[in-house]
Amino acid sequence: MSRDITFGQFYPANSFVHKMDPRAKLVLVIAYIVAVFLVKSLYSYIAIAVFLIAAVLGSRVPVKSVLKSVRGILVIVILTAILNIFFFSGGERVLFSWWKIKITVEALLFALHMALRLIFLVIGTTLLTLTTTPMNLTDGMESLMSPLKLIKVPVHDLAIIMSIALRFIPILIEEVDKIMLAQKARGADFESGGLIKRAKALLPVLIPLFISAFRRADELALALDARCYNATPKRTKYKVLKLGWRDAVGVIILAILIAAIAAVNASFWGLFGFSFGV
Amino acid sequence: MSVEIKNLSYTYSVGSPFQKDALHGISVTINEGEMVGIIGSTGSGKSTLVQHINGLIKLTSGSIKVYDIDLTAKKPDLKRLRSMVGMLFQYPEYQLFEETVLKDVAFGPMNFGATKEEALAAAEEAIRLVGLDFDEVKDKSPFELSGGEKRRAAIAGVIASKPKILVLDEPTAGLDPIGKREILNLILSLKKAFVKTVIMISHNMDEIAEFCGRVLVLSEGRLIADCTPAELFEKEYSLEGTGLTLPHTVNIKRLLGQKGLSLKGDTLSAPALADAIAEALRRRV
């Protein structure tokens, strides 16, 4: 039921992308986001699409699960596209005009551009969470942020807070399911009525949920205390992160991709004397 | 017949890597007036099975009929079904939410369409029935009650709508021995009041042996035994591979038998066993 909402939840598989180092994946995703924002020509999107398809295939996550993430933001994508079509100014090739509304070819292309950018961003970042366990993700972040320790940022504490938060998401979802079932059995109705009625109907779920969340937090704090847990600066790790050849392959491919996009952009600006011109 | 289940199968998360078969072709008929125990190790499908009876899980294959409500119908009357089938979940005290115990207990009847007066009257009756001091607890916050009182209040919330069938998922989990006994006695007294049929999931073989007239054993989503507790516990082999153990009474009888003291008659409940031992000793003397 509510499990479906959490798109981007870790998808267990034994694949190239799964085996990559979380740090490499994090850096690659950031670089990928930069690449997507660098794109100025539709041709570059083809390059990004090829890269994405390769990454999805290399992750062995079913395309359906990946596309689920797009479904979640479809409304936003469509809305942005529509707004862009109507509010783009400065187009010259007019396709359609009525009263003050004018739709130009440039506006359509720009809207497509923005929609593609959003979709590619979401697919790329979802692939990270689909192929990396929350544990690995926080480990990777901690490792990447460790230089901040020099300026006294409590990196380890931040990482442990994050991993506890991530760890609790499925537990709380399960709890919501359980409480909802119990209240449904007592005749609660979560599916009919208007917005306000539905919001009100959630009260019998939210109150027990909050109470149990606080109880769990208390118990966890006690358990951590009982085992003398403290975030001492020198902790060893059970699983030590290690960069491997897969990470090198990923970095090289993305570097080529960014170089290609930059080259296309440069030619778009006429540096090479010819233009793909959109 | 109050519940008729035919060829029920269910699979969780179809088409994802978390896909899991929970039930395989379960067929069972539960008659009015029965007290049925359901046992099985964790993940054997007990909860999935009982949640089907309440329409909490949508039927995907097979058929279920609860009195005159057919769950294979396109839009079964779930409200009426749920008012007829009371369902007590594990640790029911975690579902309490209202400001006062009285309001919380009245939540069910209100949802099932009772007027405010009717609901409050039903709540009062339910609170008294579960053995709580009505005048003392009615205006208290449910979170101020003790553990055992909270569970009673939660039970009151389930029975306030006067269900004919009461489904309990490990009603005694997490209680001390006295609390356990009190809850079981409460269930018996409810059965004398208006609850006609009781279906109880339990991990406690002693409870099943003593209280249930019939026991269903689930293992990996299949119904592997449907008989009386005496029949089940006499032949130990049927429990092999299910991760279940024998009740203490059966074990004691067996050990005594090995030492040469054979017991006669019903020995499943602790008092009956004690009588049987006394009887056997008297015969010896």
Image (spheres, rainbow, N blue to C red):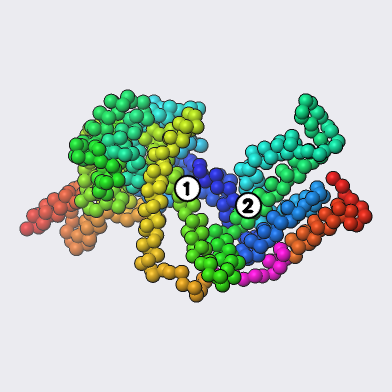
Q: Residues within 10 Å of mark 2 (few under 14, many from 20)?
A: many
Displayed quadrant of residue B152: top left
Displayed quadrant of residue B119: top left
Q: Pointer 2: what residue?
A: A126
Q: Pointer 1: what residue?
A: A173
Q: Decide whether residue A246 is among the magenta residues.
A: yes
Looking at the picture, do discs 2 and 1 lie on one chain? yes
Classify residue B252 as left or right of residue A269. left
The residue at 60%/67% (across/down) is: A144
Tell me which segment is drawn in magenta.
Answer: A239-251
Where is residue A232? Give x, y as percent. 46, 72
Assess whether mark 1 and mark 2 are in contact (beta carbons under 8 angstroms): no
Chain letter for mark 2, please: A
- From what the image shows, is residue A271 above or below residue B225? below
Pick the front one: B103 or A239: B103
Label 2, secondary structure: give it.
helix
Residue type, label 1: Ile
Pick the front one: B81 or A230: A230
Whether residue B274 is visible to the viewer of this picture, yes or no, is yes
